Image (tube, helix red, strand yellow):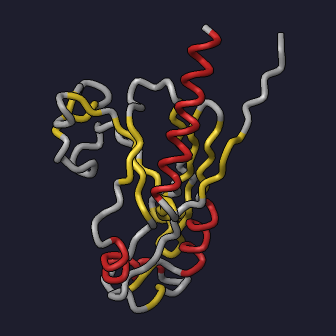
Amino acid sequence: MENYIVRLLHIITPGIRVKGCCECCHAPDYCPVLAYCCCFDYPAYIVNKVNSSRYIYVREHSVEWNNPLIQQDKGPCFGVSCCDLAVLDNVSVIYYDDLYFDTVRNGTRSCNDCQTFWCGGRGEKVTIQSRFCLGLCKRGRGSVCFVPSYCPTICCPCISSPELWVEDAESAVKLIQDARDSAVKRIFIER
């Protein structure tokens, strides 16, 4: 059997989590619960861990990214800590021949710089979608086969619409689309 090594084509610079102007300071390390108040951000060590754990790899057959989650650490109070937070890896991979990978588009909100200044942000957004019915519906996973396009992902978690937070969405879309097009051509020629 041949050894097959999957090549890494590109590393896309992920977006950095930025606090908004309403959040005047970081919560102290010993009391991270203050981050749930409107004027405090997560402790600086948590924000640094989240930003340093992010990555986006464009491989010759897939896109892999880590969008870490923040949650309470293990502890003595019903299994969780009241004073410590932890950063958990949340790695996702989507292959170019996936049924739900039709389009890659720049999904950055309008006036992103202004909204990031006021409310904070994670960078620019790239979405990978599968739309049909003249773009009015998105494909869903599981028992929900379709969802209207205007329905936000937070209301319908069954929508199959992965989101990547990047520094520059236009160049990321081009890199991913070019890698996917070349992979599809290569697969088609090999068959």
Task: Return the residue nearer the eye: 141 or 26.
Answer: 141
Task: Return the residue nearer the eye: 156 or 64.
Answer: 64
Q: Left of 32 or right of it: where is 134?
A: left
| Residue at figure coordinates x 21%, y 30% from the top left | 146
Give the vertical position of 63 relative to 25 (above or below): above
Task: Return the residue nearer the eye: 128 or 188.
Answer: 188
**Which quadrant, please, contains the C terminus?**
top right
| Residue at figure coordinates x 71%, y 41% from the top left | 8
Give the vertical position of 103 relative to 45 (above or below): above
| Residue at figure coordinates x 32%, y 82% from the top left | 37
* Residue 61 visible in the shown view: yes
Residue 6 in the image: state x and y as whole percent: 73, 31
Residue 104 in the image: state x and y as whole percent: 41, 42
Give the vertical position of 88 relative to 21 (above or below): above
* Residue 36 visible in the shown view: no
Q: Left of 1 or right of it: where is 67?
A: left
- Image quarter for residue 120? bottom left
Residue reaching furthest to the bottom? 24
State the count of labels: 0
- Image quarter for residue 62? top right
Give the vertical position of 186 relative to 156 (above or below): above
**Which quadrant, please, contains the N terminus?**
top right
Q: Left of 79 or right of it: where is 54?
A: right
Residue 74 in the image: state x and y as whole percent: 55, 60
